[in-house]
Amino acid sequence: AIPEKWIQLAYPLFLPVGIWLASIGFIGAALKELNIDTSKNLVQNDVLPLEIQIIEWIENQGKLTGQRPTQREAAQYFKISESKVSRKLAGMKFTANN
C-alpha cells in the first residue's frame, strides 16, 4: 500500500503538474499557428538562392507598393538579420560587376 504521507504530498501537486502539462500543448498549438503564413510565401522559391529570393521580393514589393522596402523589412520578411541581408545584396552587386 502507499504510505499516507506520500498521498498527502502528491495530491496537492496534481493541479500544478496538470497545468504545466496543458501549457506544453497550448504552446505547441500556438507555435503551429504562427508558421502557417510564412510557409506559403517561400514554397515556390525554395530552389532559388537566398540572394535571388531577396532581390525578387524587393523588386516585387517595389512594383506592388511603388516604394522599395528597406533592408530591415527584408530581414523581417525572411527572418534573418539585417547584416545578412546586406551581405547577400553586396555579394550580388559584386558578382554583377565582375
Image (tube, rainbow, N blue to C red):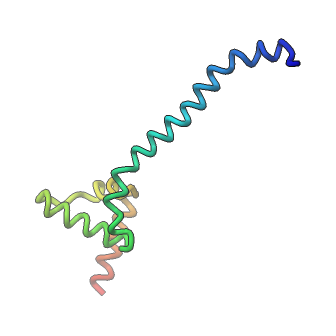
Kindly indicate the quadrant of the structure image that contains residue 61: bottom left
What is the tally of numbered marks visible in this picture? 0
Instruction: Establish if 42 lies above or below 5.
Output: below
Q: Point out the residue furthest to the front here.
A: 1
Question: Measuring 37% from the left and 50% from the top, which residue is drawn there?
Answer: 36
Instruction: Establish if 8 lies above or below 65.
Output: above
Where residue 12 sits: x, y (%)?
69, 15
Q: Is residue 96 left or right of residue 59?
A: right
- Give the quadrant of the C terminus: bottom left
Where residue 44 sits: x, y (%)?
32, 67
Q: Point out the residue furthest to the left here.
A: 66
Q: Is residue 98 left or right of residue 4?
A: left
Q: Point out the residue furthest to the bottom here.
A: 98
Question: Measuring 30% from the left and 66% from the top, which residue is drawn there?
Answer: 54
Q: Is residue 7 left or right of residue 61?
A: right
Instruction: Establish if 54 lies above or below 27.
Output: below
- Give the quadrant of the N terminus: top right
Kindly indicate the quadrant of the structure image that contains residue 43: bottom left
Residue nearer the viewer, 66 or 84: 66
Residue nearer the viewer, 69 or 37: 37
Where residue 34 sits: x, y (%)?
39, 45
Question: Measuring 40% from the left and 57% from the top, which residue is drawn there?
Answer: 81
Question: Measuring 38% from the left and 61% from the top, which residue is drawn there?
Answer: 83
Kindly indicate the quadrant of the structure image that contains residue 79: bottom left
